[in-house]
Amino acid sequence: MAERKLLPWRKMWDYIGEIGESPSLRDLLRRAVEGLPRLISCDHAIACLATADPVSAKVFVHVEHNGAPKNAIRAYCERYFREDVARLYMDRSSLTYQMDWRQAKLADNAFVREFIHGLLHIDLSSGIPIYDADGAGGLNLCFTRVRTSAVSSRDESILTALRPHVANLYSLFKRLENLPADHLFAAELAGESELLSKREAEIAGLLCKRLHANEMASLLMISKRTVETHVQHIYDKLHVNNRVELLHRLMGAQR
């Protein structure tokens, strides 16, 4: 019996580990969406990423999904994101949220009528809202169901437990994508490790940006074998064994 009770949490940790191995923020969203139905029974899983441009003040929207119609996703990114009732009226202090789209008060809402019921045909959505510090962008990871308005205590517990881990991964990936490469290289001075060469520092930065050996070889116009040799030298000099340890070493040195 104890073994059965632990099973959902083991699945949750596997899920967190899997999305944490993503090479980019968008891949993290894709993996998060693909894995969520293994934790919570649902008709669709969706991740919506909103990014604010500080210069133009425009908000760009990217959506990953596991089966929602492409025309619905395109419509959401181009128009309905700005009309999303759940997003506009959500309590930003809430760790999770749920929306019963069959509420009588929503019957005349164009967003609900045209998008939620017209394109997606869903009755319930529930998920994890994560906001950027400026409030202009962020991530929403959610699941949807048809012909139900119930979110069980188990569903709620899983979402609540997942939220801090997903939020931390989202913040880390955002930080990596926004850091100039040179910002990463200063971390090679950490501890008493031997300094990296200019090329090694360059490759260390690309490793932190989650590029693979083939991608680095193409970008730097060197062979894959040469890249792998540099990577091994980096690990030896910084006294780490893999990419995860390297990331912790380099990012930790900037605090």
Image (tube, rainbow, N blue to C red):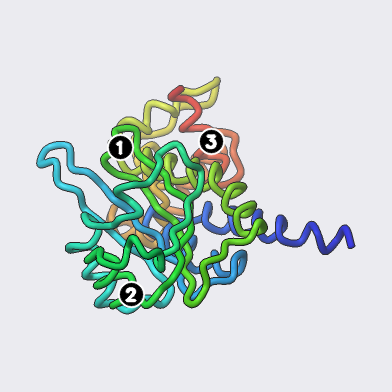
**The residue tagged with tag 1: helix, strand or loop?**
loop
Front in this rendered view, residue 189 or 163: 163
* Mark earlier in primary sequence (3, 2): 2
The answer to whether 7 is drawn above or below residue 44 in the figure is above
Q: Position of residue 158 (x, y in %)?
A: 62, 54
Which residue position holds label 2? 117
At label 1, which amino acid type do we have?
Gly
The answer to whether 73 is drawn above or below residue 49 in the figure is below
Farthest front residue?
104
Q: Is residue 199 left or right of residue 78?
A: right
Q: Marks 3 and 2, Cα distance to the nearest angstrom?
A: 45 Å
The answer to whether 87 is drawn above or below residue 253 in the figure is below
At label 3, which amino acid type do we have?
His
Residue 226 seen in render: no
Farthest left residue?
56
Residue 135 — which label?
1
Q: Position of residue 57 (x, y in %)?
A: 14, 41
At label 2, which amino acid type do we have?
His
Residue 248 — which label?
3
Front in this rendered view, residue 25 or 74: 74
